[in-house]
Image (tube, rainbow, N blue to C red):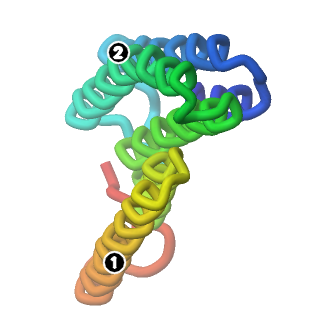
Amino acid sequence: VIPAAAAVLLSVLPGYRLTARLNVLAALLTFVTASSLFVVNPESGTYLLVDDLNKVFIVLTTFVGFTTSVFSASYIGHELEIGRLTPRFLRFYHAMYQVLMFAMNLALLSNNVGLMWVAVELATLTTVLMVGIYRTPAALEAAWKYFLLGSVGIALALFGTILVYLAARSVVGEGLDAMAWNV
């Protein structure tokens, strides 16, 4: 929830220094919250699952997200100073960074194959927007290529998921329970 709330807040705040600091703070809070999963064991539900394996992946992902946000704060600030980016694009970058963190965490926590697919697709689309942030012909071409390759991969993953479900339908049943891992 922290990255989603931070993304909304970052999309409306005007100053790039403030948004960079808030991006780092949101990533730090997300990392601290993820680390608390080793102490607190939340209940799993129909849509979200926290087990011992994905705790490690969530903490690792949020740690990498935090360290990257620290590095990118100074790097993106430098890009503004030399004129390659505008403050509007920086606000967009920080908001998309938090949407990406939200999507990656949601994909790791999802207890539903459909929800996991949506989270991975959201992460892919967010990354496409971040790749094309410079708005140069080369950046837009790279974003377009990434979009095509990523979308083809995600479409094949969805197709494979549907085929596995159809093959296992007689064993797992139908409906929402068939799409969730029962613990």
Three-letter amino acid code at the position of disc 1:
Val
- State the SS at label 1: helix
Residue, disc 1: 152
Position of residue 146 measured from the top left corner of the image (x, y, whole percent): 36, 64
Count numbered badges in the picture.
2
- State the SS at label 2: helix
Three-letter amino acid code at the position of disc 2:
Ser
The answer, for residue 68, to whether it is visible in the render is yes
170 horizontally vs 124: left or right: left
Q: Nearer the viewer, residue 116 or 20?
A: 20
Q: Residue at x 34, y 11 (%)?
A: 39
Asked where in the image residue 116 lies, by quadrant, the reply is bottom left
Image quadrant holding the N terminus, namely top right
Q: Nearer the viewer, residue 172 or 149?
A: 149
Residue, disc 2: 35
The answer, for residue 115, to whether it is visible in the render is no
132 horizontally vs 158: left or right: right
- Above/below status of 6 relative to 51: above
